[in-house]
Amino acid sequence: MDLTLATADSIARACITRAAEMGLKPLTIAVVDASAELVVLLRQDGTSLLRPAIAQGKAKGAVGMGLGSRALYNRAQEQPYFIQSMNALAGGSLVPVPGGVLIRQAGKIIGAVGITGDTSDNDEACAVFAIEQAGFTADPG
């Protein structure tokens, strides 16, 4: 299955709903497809200037590496030169911190969600919730 605009939009809006339930700071949510192309970007009022780039960096990095950004964070701790090299290959846009969650269906990566604005753990929790609510498997790494 390809990630449709309707599905990506539904996931992003579920992230916003969940964030409100959790009382989180304003979020920016990026949903990308399996080719790491942006499908939806939602930015709540009050977010800072770099948040869209950070959200996309989390999502695109997850798809590009085939790993949720929590796994990329752990890899950065263990092998910082490797992640620095991957970031250079990604044009400096790889963001290896939690909040980039792969969207899987039947084991296959169909996209990813990248969220930023609150703590990385809270960002990730919103993404996982929204992906699972949409009927997919969330893979945060």
Image (spheres, helix red, strand yellow):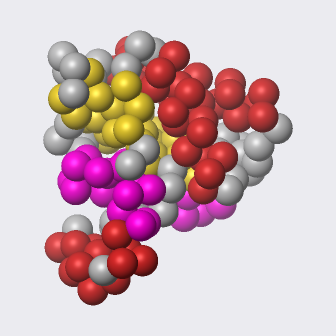
Of residues 107 and 33, the one drawn nearer to the viewer in this rendering = 107
Relative to 15, say whether 68 is above or below.
below
For the magenta stretch, what is the residue range? 48-74
Would residue 108 be counted in the magenta stretch? no
Residue ID at (36%, 63%): 72
Of residues 43 and 67, the one drawn nearer to the viewer in this rendering = 67
Of residues 31 and 129, the one drawn nearer to the viewer in this rendering = 129
Q: Residue furthest right?
A: 23
Quadrant containing the N terminus in the rendered view: top left
Residue ID at (41%, 67%): 74
Give the left or right position of residue 84, taking residue 6 as reference.
left
Quarter occupied by residue 23: top right
Is residue 21 visible to us here? yes
Instruction: Count the labels in the image.
Output: 0
Residue ID at (24%, 42%): 37
Which SS type dominates the magenta stretch? Answer: helix
Of residues 44 and 108, the one drawn nearer to the viewer in this rendering = 108
Residue ID at (37%, 25%): 137
- On the image, the x and y values in percent for residue 94 come to 34, 66
Relative to 11, say whether 74 is above or below.
below
Is residue 47 visible to us here? no
- On the image, the x and y values in percent for residue 90 come to 23, 68
- On the image, the x and y values in percent for residue 54 come to 48, 60
Would residue 62 be counted in the magenta stretch? yes
Q: Residue furthest front?
A: 78
Give the left or right position of residue 24, taking residue 12 as reference.
right
